[in-house]
Amino acid sequence: MTTERPERWTQATVYPDMWADPADDPRNSEGPSPDGEAATLEDYLTNYRHTLRMKCEGLDAEQLARRSVPPSTMSLLGLVRHLARAERDWRNWITDGEPLPKLYGARDADFDGALPDPALVEAAWQDLTREQAALDAELAAHPDLGERLGAQRLSVREVQVHRIEEYARHCGHADLLRECVDGRVGQ
């Protein structure tokens, strides 16, 4: 049994084992790291968000929806949808009001519904952008990282660290999924 594997490739020219040249990498920060815990957490989250977008760049709807590692239902589009859903869930965790409805319905619908349709791809990116901005704004209203919010009394710090952990884990998945789709390797 032979399995076709895409040839490994990269767009980087300075360091051929990298995803992007340092000058083109939105995560690249020459100079000092952010000051303070809140700024550091925000910087890590921003960089993982950039990483996810980079892993999806240049792919069409079929490639984004491709389940590259059977029997898993995971795909790059599924990850985008899953993270949009997670952002909404985290916002529900910290609000005292009526929770917003779950995005995409039942459990795993974020992955199961990731179909090769350009309209679904566009909607997923819109959902992710909207949910990120909404939770970012909610948390910005609470600058004390130790402040406890919502019925579960989660600290702002705990929510931020959980967000970073979730994006980091799924960016690892995205590395493997992307390499299976077209051979592009990450850094």
Image (spheres, rainbow, N blue to C red):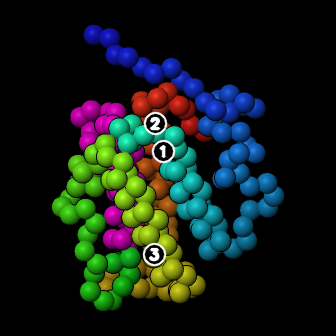
Q: Which residues are magenta?
A: 65-90
Numbered mark located on residue 5 in the image: none
Q: Residue 46 versus residue 37: which sits nearer the camera?
A: 46
Q: Nearer the viewer, residue 159 or 64?
A: 64
Can you say which quadrant of the picture contains the N terminus? top left
Instruction: Tell me the mark number nearer the camera, choosing from 1 and 3.
Output: 1
Identify the residue shown where x is 36% and y is 71%. 88
* Residue labelled with disc 1: 56
Instruction: Read off the residue under disc 3.
Output: 135
**Horizontal side, residue 44 vs residue 95: left or right:** right
Residue 121, image x, y percentages: 37, 51
> Nearest the camera: 126 or 19?
126
Q: In the image, what residue type sits under mark 1?
A: Cys
Residue closest to the far front: 119
Say which of 23 and 35 sits in front.
23
Secondary element under disc 1, as helix, strand or loop, is helix
Rendering quarter of residue 108: bottom left
Residue at image point 39% right, 37% down: 63
Is the residue 178 above or below the residue 130 in the image? Answer: above
Q: Which quadrant of the structure image shows residue 123?
A: bottom left
* Mark 2 in CB contact with mark 3 (< 8 angstroms): no
